[in-house]
Amino acid sequence: MSTIREIPEVAALRASRHLIRIPPEIDVPLTRRVRQLVDAPEFRRLANISQLGLVSLVYPAANHTRFEHSLGVYRMALLYLDRLADNDRFEAAVPPAAAERFLVAALLHDLGHWPFCHPIEDISLRQVPSHELFANSFLLEGELADILRHEWNIQPRDVVEMLTHKPADRCGRLLRSMLSGPIDVDKMDYLMRDSLHAGVPYGRNFDQPRLIQSLCLNEAGDTLAITDKGKTAAEMMVFARYVMFSEVYWHHAVRSATAMLQRAFFLLHPHLDVDSLFRLTEQPMIAALRNAAGDGPSAELLDGLFGPSRKLYKRVAQCSLFQEPALYERLARRPYPWLVRCAEQFAGLASRALSRVVAPHEILFDAPPVELEVEFQIEVFFPKEGCYRQLGDVSPVVKTLAKQQFDDYVKRVRLFAHPRLAADLRALPGLTDLLAQAIDLAT
Ligand SMILES: Cc1cn([C@H]2C[C@H](O)[C@@H](COP(=O)(O)OP(=O)(O)OP(=O)(O)O)O2)c(=O)[nH]c1=O
């Protein structure tokens, strides 16, 4: 095999047999060695982990799995390679063997995800590994590792490196930007797929084929870029991501459910064996958490999420950076245990103000996590002028939505309370002072 187009999987893009169908009417071509990976237990596990976790409590059809998404990402990786195979600079920089490793890395990029991975990772507990690190145990040994070695002639360690390390060489940097960057194969699939299953148009409202058609290399030749033909599609993708965050991933009821799970996990984690817990699929993990909760405070939180009736905590107060910058700045990107202390202090103050017992777990503070989202920095090539410019410099939409603190626009600070308390707390005349006092006491 001497060219990218001769890679059997890229050639199979034009095949009419051995296809897996995924929504929306997309055929993913399978070669024998791809099927072997997809059928391996480490990959099958993803068929029992939902992509969006608690989002389905708000958007009931958002039940698609990491398995479906991974197949979508793999097909997207094939389309990227097929397009870039026409690019002389790409062909010169990326040998076919490296392109094959990229395909495998795209397919396996989510192997380390466990159920409800994002909310749990976001609270940054010492005992919780990153999902990228957790993937090592599924990638480096077992059936899947044997298939990589014997059927693909790929060392599992090289896939781990491609997914987790900052590469020093040009080829590595280029492939890495296709796996994790502003227009990576992951975002291209999940924005469309999450939007489709949630039943909203926002994440699908950009011209994917046009964007793929415009893929090229940046001026230095070590990162993915686009030509000016893809500029509008890229701007609309930035907007799609912004709206998906505000309407789906950071929807207030999704955040209520997220804050409930985070507090339950935080209360339980000293008694959990996280390594074996994270190997479970979704339903067994829920059962293990509820079992560990017994009749302690986390049981009520977990029951509201996973019990026979849905009882999400209600909003008592919320603000963005623009509404209340001082309050926002005090709560955003602070360590999670400190947010729990704020909630405990607020529960004490609220007990006095309402003259009834408010238990600490009945109050939840939710705020943007420490980790910031990826910035949308991408070069645009203007062939007529023969120059490259940053998309943010030629697009007011991107400048506003992506360059300047994407997180502060879409992620709010919120105070949630148990439904039996929320209305009374909202009616308290001194609520804002109570909030400020709780933060002072926790600091
Ligand atoms: C941030 C976030 C993402 N998600 C979903 C949206 C996507 O389907 C998926 C994205 O996460 P991943 O697939 O883990 O990818 P990522 O974190 O590398 O994403 P990005 O490149 O955007 O930084 O998780 C949530 O459900 N809740 C969240 O709070």
Image (spheres, rainbow, N blue to C red):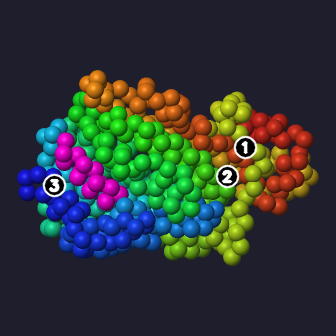
The yes-or-no answer for disc 1 within 8 Å of ligand 1 is no
Q: Would residue 387 be visible to someone looking at this image?
A: yes
Q: Are marks 1 and 3 in contact (CB under 8 Å)?
A: no
Query: Which badge, 2 or 3, is on the more N-terminal residue?
Result: 3
Which mark, residue 380? none
Q: Would residue 288 be visible to someone looking at this image?
A: no
Q: Residue at x 28, y 50 (%)?
A: 80
In the displayed structure, 72 sits above or below 344; it is below
Q: Are marks 1 and 2 in contact (CB under 8 Å)?
A: yes
Foreground: disc 1 or disc 3: 3
Relative placement, left or right, of 24 versus 197 is: left
Q: Residue at x 43, y 65 (%)?
A: 24
Which mark, residue 5? 3
Which mark, residue 252? 2
Q: In the rendered structure, which segment of residues is drawn in magenta?
A: 73-87
Front residue (pair 13, 435):
13
Asked if residue 118 lies in the magenta stretch, the reply is: no
Amino acid at pointer 1: Gln
Q: Which residue is mark 1?
A: 318
Where disc 1 sits, the SS reads strand
Where disc 3 sits, the SS reads helix
